[in-house]
Image (cartoon, rainbow, N blue to C red):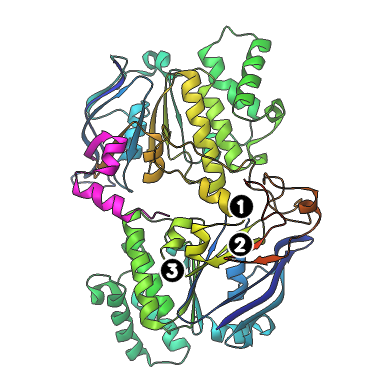
Amino acid sequence: MSAILDVVDLHHRYPLPRDGIFAQRQYVQAVEGLSFALEEGKILGIVGESGSGKSTLARLLVALETPQRGEVRFRGERISGLREARLRPFRRQIQMIFQDPFGSLDPRMRIGASIAEPLGVAEPGLDVAGRRRRIVAMLERVGLGEGAMMRYPHQFSGGQRQRIAIARALITHPKLLVADEPVSALDVSVQAQILNLLLDLKLEFGLSLVFISHDLGIVRYLSDRVIVMQHGKVVEEGESEALFSRPAAAYTKTLIAAMPRL
Amino acid sequence: MLVVDNLGISLGQTRALRPLSFSLDAGETLGIVGESGSGKSITALAIMGLLPEVMQASGSILLKGENLLALDESSLCALRGRRMAMIFQEPMTALNPVMTIGRQIAEGLVLHGLMTSEAAASEAVRLIERVGLPEPELRAHSYPHELSGGQRQRAMIAMAISCRPALLIADEPTSALDVTVQAEILALLREIREETGMGMLFISHDLAVISKLANRTLVLYGGAAMEMGETQALLAAPRHPYTRGLIAAIPRGNAHTTPLRPIRGHVPELHGLPDGCPFHGRCLTGTDLCRRSSPAPDVASTTAWCHHLDGGQGA
């Protein structure tokens, strides 16, 4: 089996504000020596509490940040540290969705135009009618109709907005989707719909998925493999069922014990 | 101790909460679970007398026999903090950022005339220690921004219990916290409940969290009661289609073995809800009767408000 994503010894830190202009600059180490691989067609779950570095990792994976050390490889090719022009062919293949789709959708742009944007960059040769067909098909696929095209983000509920964000992410037919807490802000009854939609689309589009969440129940449910992060490092990694039924690391055990269950 | 009788809340023509009745004994915890727009937070605000002015409440709320809805603002002020207190999801917005933790905790004790300011200051340190903050004397002089999220929630609990209120309302007190911190705060609330014998209304969107604390649980949806009963009975054998759907929508096990059964549709806007059951439209057993008329309560292992309790599989 081949890996779609290889992460090798990834390090990333953020500078802290200086105490004074002559003071030594201090840093927080957000990610420290991460290495793992994601196989084609699989779902990798990443769990951790606040400050564990999981969101920094997400930004590194989609090349929104450049690591201080180490590298991210997509199908064997290094993408970390590339200049934007050389990254462009990878951008359409690696997409991301966030916790708050409202923050990633332009409030003044109609939904149709929002979804058309990445498509225009990825497939500039597509004519107006062809583009429209693709957008309508995608909107219908995520459970919204053609009517959604002419409306604005604020006219939709949270769950519908996450459907729109998913449509926008998948319109270029990416191979890798990084989802950072995509259902955390949604009502319980709607969460399950979005999780099922992601699972269906994964099969249909042949996606591989990195799914980041603080919710252990959801990560256990969705993932093939799981990584537990704490303070920027991997504490434990394993097959989902094995890791949750027989955790080895003390921190994993603490997390699982603290998780409220019905 | 607390008797809420036919409490209704409206915003102009929109019914934000349909007539709701429940009671709470000393030492007991009632969990209120619901999604956005269910009415769970405005119920809490109505009890505290903190409803926005544009909303009107009807019915009655008796706290130890006194009708809170009939009181004027100054009488309510005398009760708030003294007989009833509230903690919120985000303590940073409820704590005063320019006042030390110690002074904020002591403030209520002095304001309600329970202690001199010296006595209140040392009581504040004792309370800070009680809620499990390290180095209580030092912490008393800290400002809210110097504490972590979990520590701030502990400080807010100290403030809420300072005057030994009979009723504590906790509105999503752990929803913004990490799961390990959440477990600690839930344990703390349980301990304090045992110690003080106060009654607690525990509001959350998370049934699993509610089940850790609540003796009884009330399920709200779209501003109306769906089901109420002993928490264990309600979780073991939910009777209302909405409760059943809510429980089925929580991921269990792994996707390869256990398909997830979501509730169809989305959480509705409050205006535009039918006269009858608000869950009509998302419910698989919903009929025309459900749209037209509100169901009467049906009392068995739990109390459920549904026209079709015996038929169908629900959502």
Q: Is residue A220 visible?
A: yes
Circle 3 or circle 1, nearest the eye: 1
Q: Which mark sits nearer the N-terminus, 3 or 1?
A: 3
Q: Chain of mark 1?
A: B
Which of B2 and A130 lies nearest the eye of the viewer?
Answer: B2
Q: Quadrant of the C terminus of chain B?
A: top right
Q: Position of residue B151 (x, y in %)?
A: 33, 65
Query: In the shown orientation, is residue A31 left or right of residue B307?
Result: left
* Residue ID for mark 2: B227
Q: Position of residue A136 (x, y in %)?
A: 66, 21
Amino acid type at image mark 2: Glu
Circle 2 or circle 3, nearest the eye: 2
* Residue ID for mark 1: B242
Separation of residues labelled 3 and 1 (CA atoms): 36 Å
Specify start and end residues of the magenta stretch as a single range. A233-262
Amino acid type at image mark 1: Tyr
Q: Is residue A215 visible?
A: no
Amino acid type at image mark 3: Leu
Q: Residues within 10 Å of mark 1 (few under 14, many from 20)?
A: many
Q: Position of residue A128 (x, y in %)?
A: 67, 12
Q: Which mark is residue B95?
A: 3
Which of A117 and A215 lies nearest the eye of the viewer?
Answer: A215
Separation of residues labelled 1 and 2 (CA atoms): 9 Å
